[in-house]
Amino acid sequence: MSDATSILIVDDEAPARARLREVLADLAPEFPHRIVGEAANAPEALAQIESQRPQIVLMDVQMPGMTGIELARHISARAAEADSDDPKPMPLVIFVTAFDEFAVEAFEVNALDYLLKPVRAQRLLGALRRAQTLLPAEHLEAIDQLVKATNTRRRHLSVHERGRVILVPLEQVLYLKAELKYITVRTREREYLIEESLTSLEEEFVDRFVRIHRNALVARPSIAGFERVTPNGEGEAGDPYWQVVLREVPEKLPVSRRQWSIVKGLVS
Amino acid sequence: MVQTEPTTSQYKSGSPAQGAGGNGGAPAAGTAAADSAAAAAAKARRQTEGAPAPVIPDTCNIGIVLRVLVPLNVLALLVAVAASNAPGEALSRFLSIAVILEPVALGSLAVLCAARKVVNAMPFWVQWTTGCGVPALLTLATALIVQQLLEPDLADGQRLYWLATRALTGAVVAWLFIEYFRLRARAYSPSFSEARLQALQARIRPHFLFNSLNTVLGLMRRDPRRAEATLENLADLFRVFMRDARELVPLDDEVVTCKEYLAIEQLRLGERLQVVWRLDGMPGDALLPSLLLQPLIENAVHHGIEPRTETGEIHITVTRPGERVRVEIVNPVAPSPPVRPGNQMALSNVRERLMLLYDMEAELKTGVEGDRFRLLLEFPYRKERRRRDVRRYFDPDR
């Protein structure tokens, strides 16, 4: 692979992508790069990031389906999964936005770079050079700050399956259950595996999911009721406990004694 | 000027040949129309500028008629009830008031409705004298007749007192109503600078400007001709955006503005945006406030198309049922909330302007039917010749 920086362009508007391509072409002598792809929406972008591993993503903020900031959150969640035996290099994100007071304010307090449309070649060059000096960890933190500042919550979970990216809408998720290093994402139809931390998922989706056990979060709307279970043993190991009965799927999830005091508030 | 179109024209991501098929958004037609519109606008502005708010309200307007008749009768009833000891007595008292009240009220409304066009162009004191004098005279006349019929044997002094107090009551009531309508008009018309600010914020959408400029820059090298046409459209649009918010324009011009706007959005959104116009029944000469439809269509694009990743259709139908103009805009409901919030403003802005201009005679209804959002706008069909009169009524009070 050459030492030219690989770049992915993400924008839902074709003329805007064309414009970025042209400006980048103008910058080629000063900033050697390869454009590894273009994406018009979030799923395309995530798939291309997975397959092309770009070093820099130029990302539009206002896009249909999923905003650039939400998309960046997916990228950072993915990067957080990286560990020593499976490094997942995180692309550096440079945001491009038309005029948006709200978002611009959030960027202003942030280390992340953003470009205003129409993008000027020199501004873009500056942003590209600065991006290369940023450490991945700093970048990750900057994205998290931005996500918090704009109060962005993901509306999907991105599942990576054999090189493909599947976006699972959050409202389809019935429960999340931690198992070894993975988290099982249960929808009515099937299960998916993701590699995120249950704690950060709980924080992010606190208004939809409730923790019922050290290893499980359940979507409030999918709780059908609670059932008291008395183990057959009737002895010292067989303390009675509660479990959650779910809508739409047959399995039942145990509620830990510690969480019951919180969860039982949902009974009424 | 683009006349009512017999065809259903559809925007595709722009083969120029389509412009020939009756597509009013084609740059050439659009420019010509907007030029003539701008000329007419300049002339119109000269006529309206500095015109003081008229004293006499539009008493033909059904809203004003109701706002006069209902409180008057309620008041009469209250007076009758308060002055009597039994229901039967209250009724007969009410009737004796109503026998003067109804002819005077209806007569005044009718006379003022006919007279106001002439009188409202005259000096203020003439307007006030007419506004209060007509009801007073009508009261006097009615009271005379009633007196002859019901109480023929009153003494002369009593008779004079009886007539004078009733005429005076008529004048005072008229004065109160006129003041009320003037205050009301003032409450609904934002002050000049406020209106300007609001107009600037609502119309020169920063997003739209920067996105459009970015689109033009994206086209510049590959397709200089289309970039040129887009800049022309943009220039026309901004000419309209900066026009006086209170100006009335023919529907034809407003449709051209909408098409120019859509032509720009089309380039940006590509195949995601499909527009179906049905203008067979459109009265092109109907007057409406400038930029009444464009924000509604912008709304449809913003809520129905922009948040979608797939193609969506906007249907715009303009018809003329009887003496009314009906505009229907249908767009898909977005699966997720729009990228930018705060667009209730477009709807409430349009509502407020309709209220100010047409009072209860205009209607703006919205609703969701399945996966489609439907907006229905109806307003009275007024043609060019009433332009001056209507426009002056629309002027804020100063």
Image: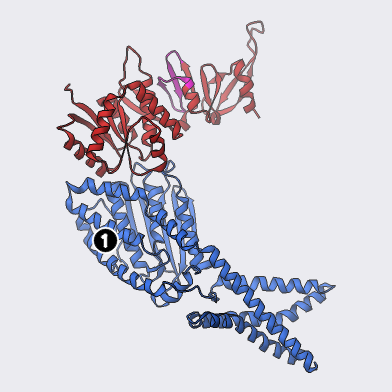
Q: Quadrant of residue A193?
A: top left
Q: Label 1 is placed on what type of residue? A: Asn
Q: Residue at x 29, y 51 (%)?
A: B266
Who is closer to the viewer here, B384 or B271? B384
Q: Residue at x 67, y 84 (%)?
A: B139
Q: Which residue lies under the disc numbered 1? A: B23
Q: Find the magenta span and give its range.
A: A179-199
Secondary structure under the numbered disc 1 in the rendered image? loop
Among all residues in the image, which is located at the extreme top? A236
The chain letter corresponding to blue is B
Specify whether residue B150 is in view: yes
Q: Residue at x 67, y 81 (%)?
A: B170
Please indicate whether residue A12 sits to the left or right of residue B350 in the image: left
Query: Quarter holding the N terminus of chain B?
Result: bottom left
Q: Is residue A190 magenta?
A: yes
Is the residue A151 above or below the residue A3 in the image?
below
Report the number of discs. Answer: 1
Q: Is residue A262 magenta?
A: no
Among all residues in the image, which is located at the extreme left? A29
Q: Chain of mark 1?
A: B
The spot of residue B215 in percent (x, y) is: 26, 47
Colour of the chain lettered A: red
Scheme of colours in the image: by chain
Q: Residues within 10 Å of mark 1 (few under 14, many from 20)?
A: many
The spot of residue A67 in percent (x, y) is: 38, 37
Q: Residue at x 40, y 43 (%)?
A: A101
Please indicate whether residue B81 sits to the left or right of residue B145 in the image: right
